[in-house]
Amino acid sequence: MNNKNIELLSPAGNFEKLKIALEYGADAVYAGVSHFSLRTRSAKEFNYDTFYEAVNYTHKMGKKIYATINGFPFNSQIELLKKHIMKMTSIKPDAFIVSTPGVIKLAREIAPNIPIHLSTQANVMNYLDALFYKEVGVKRIIAAREVSLKDLKEIKKEVPDMEFEIFVHGSMCFAYSGRCLISSLQSGRVPNRGSCANDCRFPYTLYAENKEDGTLLKLEEDENGTHIMNAKDLNLSNYIDDILKSGVVNSLKIEGRTKSPYYVAIATKAYRMAIDDYLKGKFDAKKYEKELETTKHRGFNDGYLVKRPYQKQGEQNLKESISLGTHQVYALVGEEGKTFLAKDKVEPNVAYEIVAPLNSKIQACQNEIGQIFSEGKNWYLKLNKIQTINGKIYDTIHSGNTNPVILPCSLPKFSFLRKKI
């Protein structure tokens, strides 16, 4: 495989995140409408009309979009599923992401010209399964998160014309290949039909039971209980050079359709840099790690691709569900590049670091609104006054205010303003 053709695949939880992912360097995005998607909360951001617009937008940029039809349907949903596949076929995404053999068969019958990508929830870990899915028409396998790079090499030998996609960043599920029932038991929300409540992230109180007399003894690490099922987030940025050298991976996938626009931007940017630097012979793991640390996360681990589980320790965050991150996001610049919306409290006379898409051009300026200036390799914005496009002036502005704030001069679209915590 030619490493120059490696694909960077980013999440598109809504249309804005889709645009941000493409702007920050994604070659392709994945998204879906609410029917039969494993992320119904984000999929509700799209209906058939807006998903059609998203497909056209992506294709105009010369990039790809994959439609998620990766839920596990019940018998009562089959007729609705058929209609859904027909409707999605007319929208013409570049592939369907599917989880089950039956849905693969149905999609091949209804939409023979749309490639099938097999979801990671099918948990392919050996060449026998890969051969089977090739025979039924799958073009790409999104490998099980539990598979190793060594095993992928063996699978590729047996199925050389199959494409392989791997997750390189994002949330890790406590259950095997995402096959979880905790939310079903506790809240009636079925994870494998797209309504996971993330119960594994909750704090729990543990008890030891004496079955002789029914006594329960409370066990806890502190007064808040313990996040005993809370896995740290996947981060393979340090290993992108090894992954690409293997020659067996076609697509690097970032998890996170329900995560923030800033997360989508930074994760995409970091892995774009990692891929491009590798191709230039300038791979620098610390650079990507530093940028990824600015996002909120649960701590990082390297999953199962490069090491076996028994070789590692500290893969769980027992203290908190999520809170880490070196920077706070304060604003997002609009698509027109002339205004921003506050995401936290923005004040005059405070320097905010500007984060822009790769290869963006920022120019220094200074006027009555404020100034844009550089220090070292970084660019900053400092406002003299906060003035919205409707003419109002504020002492400070918060995320609840939906009036765009005027910039002193244009910035690259979808730039972010941030500060170190």
Image (spheres, rainbow, N blue to C red):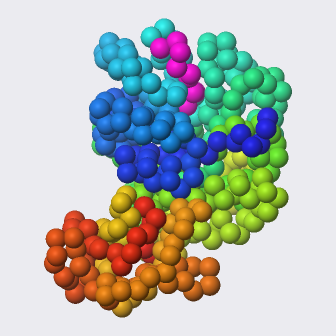
Q: Overall secondary structure of the magenta stretch? A: loop
Q: Residue 105 placed where, x, y %?
A: 51, 12
Q: On the picture, is 208 further left or further right than 312?
A: left
The residue under the point 52% across, 28% down is 94
Tell me, yes or no, if residue 232 can be seen here.
Answer: no
Q: Which residue lies furthest to the bottom in this view?
A: 349
The answer to whether 397 is drawn above or below residue 191 in the figure is below
Q: Quadrant of the N terminus?
A: top right
Q: Residue 391 placed where, x, y %?
A: 16, 76
The answer to whether 124 is drawn above or below residue 12 in the figure is above
Q: Does the magenta stretch include residue 116?
A: yes
Q: Nearer the viewer, residue 413 or 81?
A: 413
The residue under the point 64% across, 18% down is 133
Tell me, yes or no, if residue 109 can be seen here.
Answer: yes
The residue under the point 52% across, 12% down is 112
Q: Is residue 381 magenta?
A: no
Q: What stretch is highlighted in magenta?
A: 111-119
Q: Residue furthest top?
A: 109
The residue under the point 66% across, 59% down is 273
Q: Nearer the viewer, residue 238 or 29?
A: 29
Q: In which quarter of the image is residue 146?
A: top right
Q: Residue 250 placed where, x, y %?
A: 69, 37
Q: Residue 362 placed where, x, y %?
A: 51, 72
The answer to whether 297 is drawn above or below residue 35 in the figure is below
